[in-house]
Image (cartoon, rainbow, N blue to C red):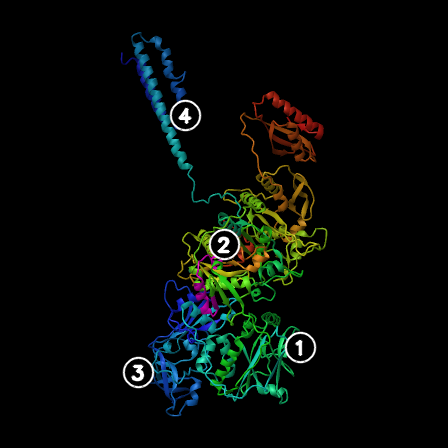
Amino acid sequence: MKIPLSWLKDYVDIDLPLDQLARLLTMAGLEVDEIHTIGLPIPHSDHSEFKFSGLEWDREKIVVAQIDEVMPHPNADRLVLCKLKDGTGEYIVLTGAPNLYPYKGQGPLAQPIKVAYAKEGAVLYDGHAAGLELTTLKRAKIRGVESFSMVCSEKELGISEEHEGIIFLEPDAPTGMPLVDYIGDAVFEISILPNMIRNACVIGVAREVAALTGKTLKKPVPTHKATGPSLKGKIGIKITSPQLNPRFAVGMISNCQHAESPYKIQRRLRLAGMRPINALVDATNYVMLETGQPLHAFDYDVLVKRVKGGVPTIITRTAAEGEKLTTLDNVERTLKDYTVLVCDTEGALSVAGVMGGLESEITESTKTVLLEGAAWNFINIRKTMSYLKLNSEASFRFARGIHPELCPEAIQLCLDRMAEWTGGEIYSDLVDEYPLPAKDPMVTVTTNDVTRWLGIDLTADKIASLLRPLEFVCTVKGNAVEVKTPPYRLDIGEEIIGVADVMEEIARMYGYDAIPATRLSDEMPPQRNNPSLEREEMVRDLLVKFGLQETISYRMTSPEREARWLQPVDKSAIDLDYVTLQNPIAVDRRVMRRSVMASVLETLQKNIRLSNRLMLFEIGQAYLPQKDNILPTEPRQLAIALSGRRETPAWDKKDNNTLDFFDLKGILEELAEGLHLEKVSFTPTTADGFHPGKCASFTCGDVTLGVFGEIHPLVKERFDFLQAPVLAADIDLEALLNVIPPLMTTSPVPLYPPVLEDIALTVDEAVPAGKVEALIRQTGGKNLVDIRLFDIFRSIQIGAGKKSLAYSLTYQAPDRTLTDQEVAQIRGRIVKRLDQELGAKLRA
Amino acid sequence: MQDHPILNELEELRKKGLESLQVVQDELGLQNWKVANLGRSAPMTQIFSQMKTVSAEVRPLVGERVNQVKKEFEAALEEHAAAIKQAMLNKSLTSDAVDISLPGRRPAHGRLHPQTKMLREIYRIFGDMGFQVYRARDVETDEYNFELLNIPAYHPARDMWDTFYTTKPGVILRTHTSPGQVHVMREYCPEPIRVILPGMCYRYEQISARSEIQFHQVEGIMVGKHVTMGDMKGTLTDFARRLFGANARTRLRPSYFPFTEPSGEMDVECFVCHGAGCQVCKNSGWLEILGCGMIHPTVLRNGGYDPSVYSGFAFGMGPERISMLRNQINDIRNFWANDVRFLEQFS
Ligand SMILES: [Zn+2]
């Protein structure tokens, strides 16, 4: 909402500098986004806090002047010479302004034209440039005539984009006065909060300023007498649904002459962001901006013609589904059965509260205006405007709730202005249907309420004095204040909700800044851990420690994108149930992901050519629709993907080995150890997406935590990965977190030295190393404390189809140094057992 | 007697021995020299075998002289060994010097996503004030996301959120973490509450440098019998000071949220320009960091709390926005694009 300062000052005295006024408004919830100055000086301070824009007018060099005569240029048709006085002397000024042509060669003018006059050295915008370009006025010779000053257009002064002609000021503009003192202004761009539609008008903002500065609000009063006949019998009104249309009032003015509105009004409309059209239309817009009540003007004669000379009756009703109306913007609209229309007996005239119809609009030939001021159900207006995708100044306001009490006052103000600007005659009364009067809630606020909500102690009198400037009617009764909502706002509720609403008004008027900041003194709630989060964070920390990079992906994807991972290699399609968006932002973001693994593989793909070593993980939700519930389950998953070089590249490292299955397995082993999991095992398995020979399940006791391995070559092709293997682990995070023991235990530091020895065993190629190790562990008993495989060896000597596994064994007893005989005994048992069960032979 | 030939011979040996020691340059040379000059078969040792040819009166003199020379040799050897050791050390120190301008070998390490770090920082600060983390679902019902938060259908406030709807009627992606307020109230009622609710939220928007369809939010809620707007102001001011520095200036100004009344927004003085106005704060000197307010009576009631007895405050902030401000990230799309060249900057 754009509020010109000069307009605001019509209703409240303001003596604050621009930035202080902006701060006052912002701190009351009317956030000022920008201040655009029109001639007024821009404050220069280190802490201005606001964005200023605009042009400052030099007091000496830009002044009000008068043109006394317009003379033709001796050798240029499109230029004229003006005899001009600026209060210091008389000059001849050259201009090409087309709006001066009609005065050319008329001799001395009976009434001088008042203009904005800029002298040599003045800084202005270049009127001929495409955008806003500053230029300094210099002495120049144009077509043989020396020129050192100019009469200005609105564009040159930064008032608007208007550059068709120069500004004609009002005839009473004082010649010689600095222009900034006459029409200097500043426009405050204010964000209107959804519950503050009452302030989307100049009077609304003025009321706030008055309340915050202790000044009086001066509301406008009509000055023209309604001297015309009564409206009774000239128009009928029929409201079919008071719920949708609580009030419909009309006034009338006749004998209007087509005219432009005064320059001041046009300037204000432009500054407020509206385009002046003609005096009648401008009056409706002006009063809407002034009071917040949208008005609609009908050409009464068109209405009469529609009923063939009879008495028109206005009917408000909902549309028939599919009913059509051509609106002001010349678009034919198809309407819904809930759209409220303003009609006559012949059909629809306008979409209520949203936009007028083309047929009955005001034209240059309109003589008699029927002026509508109505109240509409804001929810219905919202539905209509969102369906029609139509956003007008009127619907913006009606959709947030305009109080029905505003109608008659706004109609009278508007008719008054129409009379002033077009010379029309105002009908003596209004026709006003008001079947559903607004209830203005009355709530009781106690001093205790204020203490309890805001943490400040105010007397009942103080509370009342904060609210009264906003026109709340307050009655103090002991420690309570009965607060009656003023009839210009619909945002105050009933009972305790109303108390809360009034509380915000008390806080705003008291000043949020003035409320003391206190530390929590209320009872401490029961304190609870969040084990799922804490454990999840442990997993993150461990993986980061192992060198992995965490990622966070978009959770919106498409079934096609996920199929690259989820679709089995032997199937041509996959049909999965997804949480599907009705209004996706793009086709490839139309569902919620089912697989975090798919997200991480996408990330891997995206980065694979940017880095020669990628170790990524992500923890997050997947979304799985349920049969018996409208909401999906949102299981948290852990996905790991690795690819590229094992070693980080360095200038002297020549190791080009790539990451493989055992790097990933090592990470999981280390993760299991870091989480102190017990009974962890890895079992060969096959799973969709994985290389069948390089895939294992990761289990803890009898709980499967996930599957990992190298991804299938065909899946690799789908992602366009590089040659290096891609390793992936798809872990059920919730299962993993559940098996983490609440406590970990330690073993004592050994007191006696260990005995170390290496043994090499030859076994068949098909025997898994894990089995050998398990047997060694089992047979070795408690004094065999560590087994480490340090070599796998194959050779002709050992024989085809055989391999030699070399283990470092550590023997240690907690209570004594083991003797050689004891160690030999254990070793003997191990060798014998391995021979019996696996045919393993000890290599010499 | 002084020039007994054996003494001359001895003197000759002494000279030669010391001379030959001077050319020795390494450990092996020293060993060889020691064997040659002090060993069993060294010429000097041999002199003793000639002793019988020497007269008895000269004999002690020769013996003494031999011992002197031996001692002299040992001392010279020790001195020369020390010199060699020093020379070798010097040499090795010189030859072992490295080009310290070569790049260091970096230990490989992983990194958390910047937003995990940001969230943890927020958890920690609020954790110290007794707020615990409560997580709720992403896919929500319209009821929890809007209705129970005092935002009925077609209410003007619905403009504040552009919603992703799913194909199931009444099921949407949460537009804010606020539905968690009602979940937590219903779960904990009638206990007092202090929790923060982090999570991913979704809004139907054009993706640009400034706006995303998916973003984190951290909501906070406090409910009790003695909770005031002053407490809210104090808590959030403390939070801002811990996040932005002990001297961070804040201001609270009125705003609007349907689920709070009164509502406010907190700004922190721009930490780039310290209030003077710059690009980051769009010349205002202030940066908006969170929205807040006293919980609306309707919402308290929907959570099971009697608004005439209980009060509370709620607040919500965008961790991505805070990171963008703190780390001067000018494009919000960086967060979920997962380009390692971005992520690697957050060690
Ligand atoms: Zn700044």
For residue B161, what is the image quadrant?
Answer: bottom right
Identify residue for label 4: B29
> Along the line of sight, which residue is nearer the eye, A656 or A791?
A791
Residue type, numbered disc 3:
Thr
Label pair 4/3, CB-CB below 8 angstroms: no
- Which residue in the rendered view is the most extreme toward the right? A571
Left or right: where does residue A425 sit relative to residue A824? left
The secondary element bearing badge 3 is classed as: loop
| Chain part drawn in magenta | A450-475
**Chain of the residue on which disc 2 is drawn:** B
Mark 3 and mark 1: span between their CA atoms? 66 Å
Identify residue for label 1: A323
Is the same chain shared between marks 1 and 2?
no
Q: Residues within 10 Å of mark 4 (few under 14, many from 20)?
A: some
Mark 2 and mark 4: span between their CA atoms? 90 Å
Pinpoint residue B178: horizontal percent, then vertical percent.
56, 57
Pinpoint residue B10: horizontal percent, then vertical percent.
33, 16
Residue type, numbered disc 2:
Val
The secondary element bearing badge 4 is classed as: helix
Q: Is residue B188 above or below residue B12?
A: below
**Prevailing secondary structure class for the magenta stretch in the rendered image:** helix
The quarter of the picture where the C terminus of chain A appears is top right
Identify residue for label 2: B227
**Chain of the residue on which disc 3 is drawn:** A
Residue type, numbered disc 1:
Glu
Residue type, numbered disc 4:
Gly
Q: Nearer the viewer, mark 2 or mark 4?
A: 2
For residue A62, what is the image quadrant?
Answer: bottom left
